[in-house]
Amino acid sequence: MPPDSVAIALPGAGTDLTEAIRAAIAAAHAQGGGVVTVPPGDWTSGGLRLLDGVRLHLSAGARLAAAPGWDRYADTAVDSIAEDSDRGFITAAGARDIGITGQGLLVGDNRHWRVAGAGSLGTHLPVDRRPRMVVFEDCERVEIADIGIEDSPMWTLHLVGCRRAVVRNVEIRNDKRMPNTDGINLDGCCDARIEGCFISAADDGICLKTTRRDPARLRHCERIVITGCVIESESCALKIGTETWADIRDVVFADCVVAASNRAFGIFSRDGGVIERIRVSGVTVDCHQTPEGFWGCGEPVTITIARRHPGIEPGAVRDVVIDGLSGRAQGAVVLVGLPDRPVGPVTLANIDLRQVVGRLDPIGHCDLRPTTADLAPEPGQEGRKNAWVRGADGRIVGLVPYEGGMPALYARHVDDLGLAQIRLRRPTLMPPGWNRTAMVLRHVTHTPDLAPDSRS
């Protein structure tokens, strides 16, 4: 063991390590910091809270599972609320120099957090209250490295208002039918880096957001780098939003692989914060359609501005450059603003995409969710809060047909759209219901001449 290690007193019987790990964390903190090492074996635990200077280390062969039961996490309540959850498996608040490292595994076991046999539109039905796996709030100098996490019941890694955080070489494998199992959420964080991670999830892979908090604690999300990650997502692999109560800016997504996903890259402005100075480069994509219960329809790029909360104006989306994106997709590139709040400036350069027919929705639809309707279904209305709502016409609200059929690029209400070296390859025989025009531009300004192969 490292010299600053604090031993865990293993239980004489059973596998529950809750009290032993808590005692070791307290002892490490009391000596000014240290490493609490979980030994090899199959263990369970209730909620754990890290303190200043303490790192939880999962040895190779260690498998630490979150114990079932909402009450097991009463001592690890957090201020940030997500999907009506205010608890986490491993949490920290206002701590410095903390981390979770090692070659072991954290396990969520979502069977305990869903309604058995229930679900619709491609998803399980979760119970009302589920813990997140890891929630660190207002912490500084955070490292999460080399561990595996599987089967999270809710958001997997949620860093809120953290500074100088690194997530490196983490492997996340969640149930692809379990809603809200985002891989990594950076929420109002600054000077953070995510690198070399593998994420497979039903919900967003890596998501930057600024959720609604006490105004005195609301933070911008800025100076973020995401690089060298491989992501599979039934929602959006690389995402900004939808919660955007404060600004999100100076973000780089580079050299990532989006494999077997729904949406690849998306920006969703809904809640007032400005989103700006975003750079995407060296990303390869393979986008497929998912059932209607998931937002998205196989789009390689989606940028939308929409009103969601009554009386709240969405923030601007500007200075976005996507330079170097290739692969295939069953949907279209979508850029949609509002008449009085257009998207832009946006630059698309060095894009090489092959558009293929989708198995679930051969004609394709433009998905503009979340809308006001998605806040919650009306009484007697079919749907699930913050997911989907079926209108009186039987259709999902926010999932609309493209005017004239699905193009390869659809832009509406965009100011200063730059296009350079765009190659959009489509079937030789145009499928029924597709738009024969590859690029449909409505209320778009400052579009330069297109490259010769842009309409192929």
Image (spheres, rainbow, N blue to C red):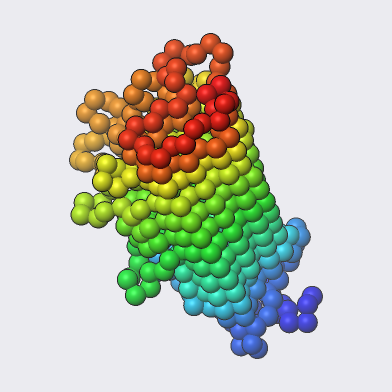
The quarter in which the N terminus is drawn is bottom right
192 or 46: which is nearer to us? Answer: 192
| Vertical relation: 4 (above or below) 64 | below
Image quadrant containing the C terminus: top right
Q: Determine the residue positioned at 53% across, 11% down.
A: 429
Q: Kindly identify the residue that appears in the image at 33 percent across and 51 percent down.
A: 270
What is the quadrant of residue 67 in the picture? bottom right
**Left or right: 310 as drawn, with respect to 341:** left
Asked whether residue 426 is in view, the answer is yes
Write the residue at 70% across / 59% down: 146
Give the residue at x 54% y 52%: 279
Q: Is residue 251 above or below residue 454?
A: below
Q: Is residue 440 shown left or right of residue 109?
A: left
The quarter holding residue 59 reads bottom right
* Residue 426 vs residue 212, the one in the foreground: 426
Residue 412 picture location, percent across and down? 35, 36
Image location (x, y in percent) of residue 241 = 42, 52
Given the current orientation, which residue lies at the most extreme front position?
Answer: 449
Q: Which one is nearer the viewer's eye here, 16 or 141?
A: 141
Q: Position of residue 366 (x, y in %)?
A: 39, 31
